[in-house]
């Protein structure tokens, strides 16, 4: 009995897809996709300047700035804040903030120093100015955020400079205008508007374990009709996943509320052949991309 040449071709194509996909993944993992998410450039307003130091005893300044463009955190009374700080997991309350890159400035002693800009909501900033407990909480959250993002160790021996609202200069920051604040599982029907030539694939995004401290985010993306890995471009940022299937077949762009370890993330492209409702009950390809992403511990 002669072998069906079309089936042999499918098997060969599947092997080639896997090899090409691994090469593609190595080339694109961790890069930023040129099609950027909705964002805008913000020049924050001065707020207060906090002096601290790194573990190497180098002076570090935090320019805590304010802007209407940053969303406020959920309302929290002083009593609720006290309970939160005394709880086992005070990090469960999140303050939206934009953490700027390091820039070097010169202090009053003509010495070089390291400066970071932290941008928060202007109304929340004013609340912190009127309440010393909220102010201390804001500074602690800012220090922790910078440590987590830039792998720093900063002293908690801080000083708020009374006669200076910022050190050096305050740089513009590019912030995204859309994001999902909480993710346990995302319904693929919750889609943003996309170009008419593309579709948003069905997907699920799960947290493992489902309760307690998150260790992994797992994305499972259905890609029916994608017959070759050559058409896929996958990008992972520290809090973002972008997948494009060309030409204009699928486009998925999602954000995470947790930071992920890009270098140790793993993607697996599974290609199965199954009977479907296609015309004449022919064999139709059915593909799933699974991306497992370790969560950076806070």
Image (cartoon, rainbow, N blue to C red):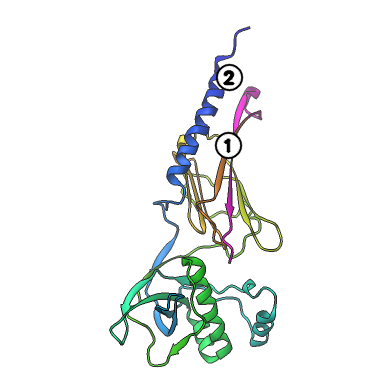
Q: CA distance from mark 2 to mark 1?
A: 18 Å
The residue shown at (67%, 87%) is 79
Q: Residue 180: say if magenta.
A: no
Q: Residue 277: say if magenta.
A: yes
Q: Residues within 10 Å of mark 2 (few under 14, many from 20)?
A: few
Read off the residue under disc 2.
Answer: 7
Residue at the extreme top of the image, as rendered? 1
**Numbered disc 2: secondary structure:** helix
**Numbered disc 1: secondary structure:** loop
Q: Quadrant of residue 109?
A: bottom left
Query: 161 or 200: nearer the eye?
Result: 161
- The picture places residue 182, in percent across and down from the top left corner, at 61, 64
Task: Check if mark 2's residue and mark 1's residue have beta carbons within 8 Å.
Answer: no
Q: Residues within 10 Å of mark 1 (few under 14, many from 20)?
A: some
Q: Which residues are magenta?
A: 273-298
The residue shown at (58%, 36%) is 224
- The picture places residue 261, in percent across and down from the top left corner, at 53, 56
Name the N-terminal-most of marks 2 and 1: 2
Q: Is residue 98 above or below residue 65?
A: above
Read off the residue under disc 1.
Answer: 224
Query: 103 or 129: nearer the eye?
Result: 103
Residue at the extreme left of the image, as rendered? 110
Query: 191 or 242: nearer the eye?
Result: 242
Q: Which mark is residue 35?
A: none
| Quadrant including the N terminus | top right
């Amino acid at each position: 009995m002669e072998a069906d040449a079309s089936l042999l071709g499918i098997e060969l194509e599947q092997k080639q897809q896997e090899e090409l996909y691994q090469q593609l993944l190595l080339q694109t993992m961790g890069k930023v996709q040129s099609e950027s998410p909705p964002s805008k450039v913000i020049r924050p307003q001065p707020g207060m300047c906090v002096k601290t130091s790194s573990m190497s005893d180098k002076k570090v300044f935090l320019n805590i700035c304010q802007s209407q463009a940053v969303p406020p955190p959920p309302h929290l009374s002083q009593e609720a804040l006290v309970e939160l700080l005394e709880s086992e997991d005070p990090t469960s309350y999140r303050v939206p903030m934009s953490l700027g890159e390091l820039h070097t400035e010169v202090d009053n002693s003509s010495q070089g120093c390291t400066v970071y800009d932290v941008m928060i909501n202007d109304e929340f900033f004013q609340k912190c100015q009127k309440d010393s407990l909220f102010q201390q909480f804001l500074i602690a959250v800012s220090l922790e955020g910078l440590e987590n993002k830039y792998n720093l160790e900063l002293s908690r021996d801080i000083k708020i400079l009374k006669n200076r609202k910022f050190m050096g200069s305050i740089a513009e920051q590019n912030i995204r205008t859309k994001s999902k604040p909480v993710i346990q599982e995302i319904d693929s029907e919750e889609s943003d508007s996309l170009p008419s030539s593309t579709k948003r694939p069905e997907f699920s995004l799960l947290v493992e374990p489902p309760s307690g401290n998150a260790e992994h985010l797992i994305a499972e993306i259905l890609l029916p009709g994608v017959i070759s890995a050559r058409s896929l471009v996958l990008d992972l940022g520290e809090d973002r996943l972008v997948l494009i299937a060309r030409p204009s077949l699928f486009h998925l762009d999602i954000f995470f509320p947790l930071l992920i370890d890009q270098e140790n993330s793993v993607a697996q492209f599974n290609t199965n052949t199954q009977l479907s409702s296609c015309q004449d009950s022919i064999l139709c390809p059915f593909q799933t991309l699974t991306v497992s992403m370790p969560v950076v511990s806070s």
